[in-house]
Amino acid sequence: MAKMDEPVDLVAQSMGGVVAARIAIERPELVRRLVLCVTSGGVNMAGLGAADWRPAYRKSFLNAAEWITSSLAASDLPVEKIAAPTLLIWGDADPISPVAVGRHLEARIPNARLEVVAGGDHDVAATHPELVAALIARHLG
């Protein structure tokens, strides 16, 4: 286990990607490598074709914390400040975080590379586990 001041590799999906991006921006010395999978990564997805997932989520998870579906939960982050080598993994059939979001992040994060999984949706890590695991292992290896 890494000590609190040693750099680590962060792997995050969906809402977790916003948290991981924030850590990579605010504490770059702590992040050695980063993997963001089907997330907003802290950018505004409104103009990138993203579907609004919040009403369906709220119906399915009645006891979920309010901040999860708050519009402030994924406020814009200065992702250009992410210094860690970053792997972006997207499914090409994700209505929540479409490939356009991954391409947008790839263009803005200095050392980023986008991998698109054919037929992958927002659960791409669950539906394509071998492929996603291999991509992550290669990036972190």
Image: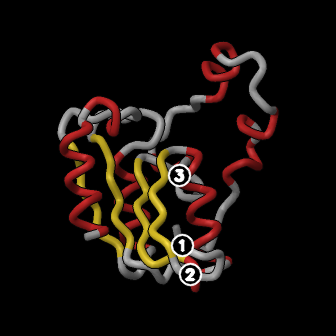
| Cβ–Cβ under 8 Å for marks 3 and 1 | no
Regarding residue 80, the answer to whether it shows in the image is: no
Mark closer to the chain start, 3 or 1: 1
- Where 109 sits versus 93, above or below? below
Mark carried by residue 2: 1
Q: Amino acid at mark 2?
A: Glu
Closest to the observer, 46 or 124: 124
What residue would you read off at disc 3?
Answer: 40
Classify 10 Å Cα crowding around label 1: few (below 14), some (14-19), many (20 and above): few
Between 97 and 31, which is closer to the camera in this rendering?
31
Name the residue located 43 percent from the left edge and 68 percent from the top edge.
34
**Mark 1 to mark 2 CA distance (whole Å):** 6 Å
Image location of residue 96, percent across then percent down = 47, 36
- Where does the image place residue 46, in percent across and percent down from the top left? 56, 46
Question: How far is disc 2 from disc 3 in space, using C-alphas?
Answer: 27 Å
Picture layout, residue 33 above or below residue 52: below
Residue 128 spot, x, y in % from top left: 24, 35
1 on left or right of 122: right
Amino acid residing under circle 1: Ala
Residue at (66% x, 62% y) in the render: 76
Contact flag, marks 1 and 2 (Cβ < 8 Å): yes
Secondary-structure class at tag 1: loop
Rendered residue at 63%/69% (across/down): 23
Q: Which residue in the structure is indicated by mark 2?
A: 6
Amino acid residing under circle 3: Ser
Q: Is residue 109 among the parts visible in the rendering?
A: yes
User: Which of the two labelled residues, at mark 2 and mark 3, occupies the earlier sequence position?
Assistant: 2
Q: Residues within 10 Å of mark 3 (few under 14, many from 20)?
A: many
Q: Is residue 95 above or below residue 33?
A: above
Q: Which residue in the rendered view is the most extreme toward the front?
A: 1
